[in-house]
Image (cartoon, grey):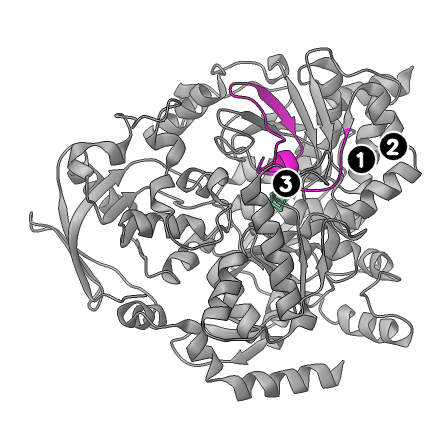
Amino acid sequence: MGKSIIDKIWEKHVVHREEGKPDLMYIDLHLVHEVTSPQAFSGLRMKNRKVRRPDKTFATVDHNIPTDNRKVINDPVALNQMTTLEKNCLEFGIPLAGLDSPEQGIVHVIGPELGLTQPGMTIVCGDSHTSTHGAFGSIAFGIGTSEVEHVLATQTLWQSKPKTLKLEINGELKKGVTAKDVILYIIAKNGIGFGTGHIIEYCGETIAKMSMEERMTICNMSIEGGAKAGLVSPDETTFAYLQGRKYAPDGAEFAHAVKNWKELVSDSDAQYDKTIQIDAADIAPMVSWGTNPSMTSKVNEQIPKLDECKNELEQKSLSRALEYMGLQEGQKIEDIQIQHVFIGSCTNSRLEDLKQAAEIIRGKKVHPHVRALVVPGSQQVKKQAEADGLDLIFKQAGFEWRESGCSMCLSMNNDIVPNGEHCASTSNRNFEGRQGSGARTHLVSPLMAAAAAIYGHFVDVGALLSAETVH
Amino acid sequence: MSGFKTLQGKAAAMDRANVDTDQIIPKQFLKRIEKTGFGQYLFYDWRFTKEGLPNQEFELNKAENQGASILIANENFGCGSSREHAPWALGDYGFKVIIAPSFADIFHQNCLKNGLLPITLPAETVDYLLQRAKNQPYDLKVDLQNGIIEDEYNFSASFTINEYWKKMLINGWDEIEITLQLETSISNFEEKRFAVQ
Ligand code: SF4
């Protein structure tokens, strides 16, 4: 029986296996940030334990840093978390891309960017969107603080092997449809828990044609479908992306690594616990209208009606969500008025995302009722975007151009959506209160967010782009 | 962490699907650097009104649910982020057991590591429990050793939990201590793995 890439990576990392116990798995890369690590380090200190492999650990600050003036941190509690991380890294010898480092950024943006993330690895971080790194053909998943402490102390984790899910996407994407729409469509169609207990392998010709940045967007939101992790087999696109990155192997070592990475690809007769097929042509630009990512529709559709619900539980969730969002059943998505636009987060804050958004915005103005923000994913993304002149396009249109961080994705800093207002956001979660108490989040692609910024409501960016090419 | 074999306690019903970690512990409370003291912020945005007063409509604020140590929830409980602050808050509030038809993976794992027992039961069974616990005081007995839940109305259901986790929960063991006993295996693994590359 053939093996999938998931089986192959898993087997290579089993340190200890015993009947009736989870496997003890070796962890190749441990990423650390300021919010979920302080209790782990104090745990180590209490028991007089060391960090086993500081060389396989890398830290940054991202969740609660300011993105306007990073020299001024008004929130003493946030400041305490940041200085605590600095102290911990110093004490335990862990490399840190701190607030003043040119390598600082959202942990899931800088891992790939620095070449820390590589095919065949097991990667963990105290953050659920660690699934992003699966784009490189690694098993990458989020862990809690106890597990952070466990990895720091032992470089291993006890894990039961998840089931495998093959998600195959074939066909051509329509104009204006991005990787973000693909993953939102998958979650809308299959539900918020479809991946629970599974690792997803995304494959098919649509995925094969995607850039690394697009694959990262897809893998990033695996967790929003409940999956433990999501990955894509490494190929030439992966290798080309990695070559020359700071922590990637170089010279003869790179060639050797590529040879090993190629062996990871799933066998043609590999078995999976579950299979899902998607036709790319069915996908349109998507907009979430509810309070979890599966409450999402195509931009030219309407919000579902209560009597269309499958059961009472679903009906209750729908009416609760509509009440929170201040929307009506059956309302047209294009009629939803927007007061805020956020382009950023580990889902969509890379150079390609910013470029795409800038193309829509070039020469236009942000709608007078809209406040719009661009928050690059990392200092490197910001620098490159500025070298390409993207910052000017955004600023001339009336966008705020910020420093890198998580920002309005979870609003732990000052970037908050006020109570009752609607935000077109390129982030990954639309839970109640995520972007601020009472804030109403709509998950969209960078293209859709950019268009909403100009029009003040949602518009079908596919139609917009087609109209522009006709002119 | 203290372990437990059986638990008799009051059960509170929370009949909502997809209760996410952002609701269990809203992000404004994630900035502490300790593991304790999160109970007061549990379900904060639901539990309190905008003015900071207890929201009488909210399940846990009802008189019959005061002092509950068992939470009966609905499907996909704990979805969302990996924040362990969620089980810390639930535990600190006083919960020891959570019953639901399904749990999100990371949350499930995080519960086990914090002495909180997540029990998965079929949807119909959970439905029965929810109906019983809604609007009236309701007691359950959870026998972790034998995997049985019972009430005073002759209801009984069995549940399974991975033997490894069962042992950890019953004894309140420190997982890192156990792993460190395998130090030689880890070193051997590292030697092999990094020699090949
Ligand atoms: S950008 Fe948002 S989802 Fe990503 S790591 Fe930061 S807070 Fe988490």
Q: Looking at the rendered structure, which numbered label has been put on residue A354?
A: 1
- The chain containing the residue under callout 1 comes to A
Q: Looking at the rendered structure, which numbered label has been put on residue A183?
A: 3
Q: Nearer the viewer, mark 1 or mark 3?
A: 1
Residue A461 in picture, x, y percent from top left = 75, 23
Identify the element where label 3 is drawn: helix
Q: Please rate how many residues cluster around mark 2, counting C-alpha atoms within 10 Å: few if below 14, some from 14 to 19, many from 20.
A: many
Residue A269 is at least partly visible in this image? no
Q: Which residue in the protein does label 2 denote? A: A390
> Same chain, marks 3 and 2?
yes
Residue A332 in picture, x, y percent from top left = 58, 14
Give me the residue at 51% from left, 18% from top. A420
Sequence-first disc among 3 and 2: 3
Q: Is residue A420 left or right of residue B149?
A: right
Which quarter of the picture shows residue A55?
bottom right
Instruction: Classify A367 as above or below A63.
Output: above
Amino acid type at circle 2 is Leu
| Mark 1 in CB contact with mark 2 (< 8 angstroms) | yes
Q: Please rate how many residues cluster around mark 3, counting C-alpha atoms within 10 Å: few if below 14, some from 14 to 19, many from 20.
A: many
In front of the other: A170 or A403: A403
In front of the other: A223 or A60: A60
In front of the other: B19 or A151: A151
Sequence-first disc among 1 and 3: 3
Instruction: Classify A313 as above or below B76.
Output: above
| Mark 3 in CB contact with mark 2 (< 8 angstroms) | no
Distance between mark 1 and mark 3 Cα atoms? 19 Å
